[in-house]
Amino acid sequence: QVQLVESGGGLVQTGASLRLSCAASGHTSIYYTMGWFRQAPGEEREFVAAITWSGSSTYDSDSVKGRFTISRDNAKNTVDLQMNSLEPEDTAVYYCAADSLGLLSELASAYNYWGQGTQVTVSS
């Protein structure tokens, strides 16, 4: 089993930045692809970004491209999401996820481990 714990969420104003972090523990493997998803009230869970185990490949959704950056530190078993130029539309619960098959997918079904989520609220 892999446990994922997100941190770094909060309430910010439009245009601000936040850095989310996800700490992995348990039967972790650096070969997992790690991803971030988000879910706003009444909406389906939405892909945000993903990164392969080596960090050499990343995949960002069009809605965050150029504003959010995903990174990982395999020595610390962490994956971060740097979020800049935040907009009210970014308000959601953000989830960290791990894919043991190492794919680089935008599909939530490809990820078999999930964190509990951290709330990000952007006020206008």
Image: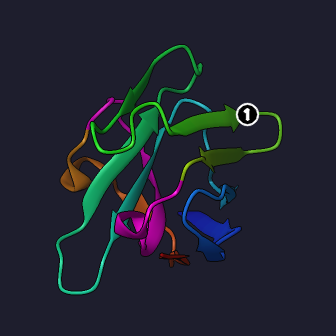
Residue in front for this viewpoint, 1 or 34 = 34
**Residue at 54% across, 13% down:** 56
Q: Residue 51's x, y, as percent? A: 48, 31
Residue 46: quadrant of the picture:
bottom left
Expressed as whole percent of the image width and height from the top left, the position of residue 111 reads 33, 52
Identify the residue shown where x is 27% and y is 36%.
Answer: 62
Left or right: residue 97 versus residue 43 is: right
| Secondary element at tag 1 | loop
Question: Is 100 within the magenta?
Answer: yes
* Amino acid identity at mark 1: Asn
Report the magenta residues as a range. 86-105
Q: Residue furthest top?
A: 56
Q: In this rendering, would 72 be left or right of 33?
A: right
Residue lying farthest to the bottom in this orientation? 42
Closer to the camera, 88 or 79? 88
Residue 15 sits above or below residue 51 on the image: below
The residue at the far right in this view is 75
Number of numbered discs: 1
Q: Residues within 10 Å of mark 1 (few under 14, many from 20)?
A: some
Query: Residue drawn at (63%, 45%), measured in percent from left and top?
Result: 82
Image check: 65 left or right of 16?
left
Location of residue 96 in the rendering, given as x and y in whole percent from the top left corner: 50, 59
Q: Colour scheme of this structure image?
A: rainbow
Query: Which residue does the numbered mark 1 point to in the structure image?
Result: 74
Along the viewing direction, whichever of 31 and 106 lies nearer the viewer: 106
Is 7 drawn above or below residue 121 in the view shown?
above
Query: Whole-percent x and y of residue 33?
Result: 46, 36
Which residue is drawn at the image coordinates 18% and 86% (left, top)? 42
**In the image, is 13 to the left or to the right of 99?**
right
